[in-house]
Amino acid sequence: MKTLIGISTFSFASPNFRSFEELENQFKSLPNLRKLCAYTKVSFEVANDILHNKDFGLSINEQVSNFEYGTDIGAITRFRLLLDRTYLRGMNRSFSHDELLERADKEPNTDERENTIVYSPSSSVNVKYLFTNETVFYQHYEFILGHFPIDNKSYYERATSFFNNLEFHKDCFSTLGRVTDGFCNYSIAFTKCLSALNECSPISIRSTKDKLTHIATKATFDCTVEGSPHKNFRFDFAIDGKEYDSLDCQFHLKPSKKNKQGNNSFHHKRLYFGFIPISETQWKIAVAAIGPHINKDSNDRYAPLKDKRKKK
């Protein structure tokens, strides 16, 4: 699921300018926004009529002509070069101002696998999907991730890009495919778990019990420890050139909700993780597996567990 961020005159703190300097200061903020929202499958769409749109009164072109040097061909040329080569560089221009607003007022398009949200710091437009700051965008990206996983690959690429406080095991992606009834059916719950871990990493709580309690509170799902060491819970991580051999990853969250409620069948869903010491007082969270229950009774750690429920 692609996320398109719409940029136009509604993306400025004010649509009215008195000088080239004021106008350029608004455009200068856009590259910083791109850095804050630099996640997988996010692209920026600047309105192809941004200089001509008159939704807020005079267009940018009309305001430029009223500047002190508005009739100076050199000043205008310099401004346009800055737009193309610096401020708007790398942004797509596939839609007009009105088209961006129309797209942002619609639900995500599952056929095209994309959604549009506009950046409007002053909330100057009335559409369903807009964000005023990076925190609101993070919430939107997380919502799209959980509710529109698309497939395992799409979900994992976006999740590992977004939850960048976590370290993921090199084979973690393959574990999503071990969910027999489909990982994407549980993507909302797993996203909540990953979000909680990401928010807690690094963590400075010394007691393991207190660490797990804190994470469980954030995730709103049970978080526990297996209780006994076993080789199937040991994972090797390589982080920033440092090897962490056989990291204990028996700690796990238990996401217990399916995206579509009403199915009471027996499921084993787990998210296993460990704590990597990065200092004497801080630990970073490493994610070992997402989805299957680790089996201590098999050489294949992800072998299906036996259903121990008593048959009626």
Image (cartoon, helix red, strand yellow):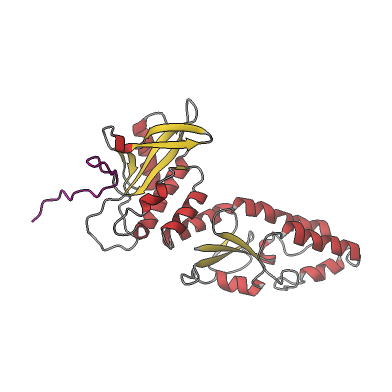
- Compared across the picture, whether 126 is left or right of 272 comes to right
The answer, for residue 18, to whether it is visible in the render is: no
Q: Could you say where residue 82 lies in the image, as x and y percent from the top left?
A: 79, 58
What residue sits 22% from the left and 48% below the top? 305
Quadrant housing residue 26: bottom right
What residue sits 79% from the left and 62% below the top? 17
Q: Could you say where residue 115 lies in the image, as x and y percent from the top left?
A: 52, 66
User: 127 and 251: which one is in front?
Assistant: 251
Q: Is residue 39 magenta?
A: no
Residue occupying the far front of the picture: 299
What residue sits 37% from the left and 53% below the top? 176
Quadrant where the image shows the C terminus: bottom left
Q: Could you say where residue 192 lies in the image, as x and y percent from the top left?
A: 41, 51
- Compared across the picture, whether 200 is left or right of 249 comes to right
Please determine whether, in this image, residue 212 is positioned above or below residue 45. above
Q: Could you say where residue 237 lies in the image, as x and y percent from the top left?
A: 44, 37
Q: Is residue 308 magenta?
A: yes
What residue sits 76% from the left and 61% below the top? 83
The answer, for residue 296, to whether it is visible in the render is: yes
- Compared across the picture, whether 54 is left or right of 278 comes to right
Please determine whether, in this image, residue 284 is positioned above or below residue 131. above
- Compared across the picture, whether 51 is left or right of 195 comes to right
Please determine whether, in this image, residue 251 is positioned above or below residue 86. above
User: What's the magenta region?
Assistant: 295-312
User: 175 and 139: which one is in front?
Assistant: 175
Q: What type of secondary structure mainly makes up the magenta span?
A: loop
Residue occupying the far top of the picture: 280
